[in-house]
């Protein structure tokens, strides 16, 4: 084994160095949050996201401009907008698995500009929601995850 170790370590390090190139253009720095880079401003990203969810028969319950809210009390933050949306056909099956999931419904999406000027579009990861509510095998999570990823991809596409 001692003779193999010097040969294996460089090979493993080389293999690991290649892995980041396969990573999607997203981050999950905050537990349970999927965040995707957007080439648009925060406002335009949320405009696009809102148009997509409406096109996909989702109900938009609210849109919150956190930047404008902060400005009303003389507090400045970078552009940040929240959209609250959903459809009972998607959310109710999740609540049938765990009624506590209602605290996370309707769904939300957040567009924000980070300190480096990069805009992100984020939403709660469906797997995280299943774990949070103790129903990781709930069949509704698959559809919710696919829908959120699809909405975000369309909204951030060039």
Image (cartoon, helix red, strand yellow):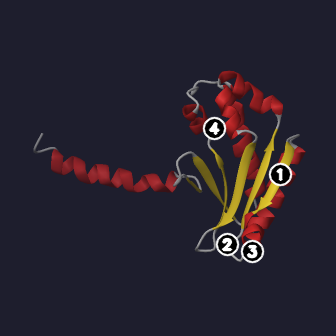
User: Label 3: which residue?
Assistant: 71
Q: Residue at x 47, y 55 (%)?
A: 20
Task: Mark 3: give few (<14), some (14-19) or many (20+) Cα within 10 Å.
Answer: few
Q: Above or below — where is 37 with respect to 54?
A: below
> How far is mark 4 from mark 1, CA to CA?
21 Å
Mark toward the start of the polypeptide (3 vs 4): 3
On residue 78, the disc is 2
Say left or right for 13 vs 59.
left
Closer to the chain start, of discs 2 and 3, is 3
User: Alpha-carbon distance for marks 3 and 4?
Assistant: 33 Å
- Mark 2 secondary-structure assignment: loop
- Per the image, the residue denoted by label 1 is 62
Please report the residue visible at 69 percent of the width from the left and 45 percent of the height from the top. Answer: 149
The span from disc 2 to disc 4 (Cα, nearest Å) is 27 Å
Closer mark to the observer between disc 2 and disc 4: 2
| Percent of width and height locating residue 14 | 33, 54
- Residue 144: percent from the left, percent from the top? 71, 35
User: Which residue has dot 4 on it?
Assistant: 126
Asked which secondary structure carries label 3, the reply is helix
State whether residue 70 appears in this view.
Answer: yes
């Amino acid at each position: 084994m001692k003779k193999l170790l010097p040969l294996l370590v460089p090979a493993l390090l080389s293999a690991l160095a290649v892995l980041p190139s396969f990573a999607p253009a997203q981050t999950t720095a905050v537990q349970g949050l999927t965040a995707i880079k957007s080439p648009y401003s925060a406002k335009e990203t949320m405009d696009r996201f809102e148009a997509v969810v409406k096109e996909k028969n989702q109900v938009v319950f609210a849109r919150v401009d956190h930047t404008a809210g902060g400005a009303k009390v003389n507090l400045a933050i970078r552009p940040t907008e929240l959209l609250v949306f959903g459809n009972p056909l998607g959310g109710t099956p999740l609540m049938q698995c765990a009624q506590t999931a209602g605290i996370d419904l309707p769904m939300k999406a957040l567009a924000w500009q980070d300190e480096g000027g990069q805009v992100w579009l984020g939403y709660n990861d469906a797997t995280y929601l299943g774990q949070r509510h103790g129903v990781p095998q709930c069949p509704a999570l698959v559809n919710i995850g696919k829908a959120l990823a699809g909405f975000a991809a369309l909204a951030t596409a060039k």
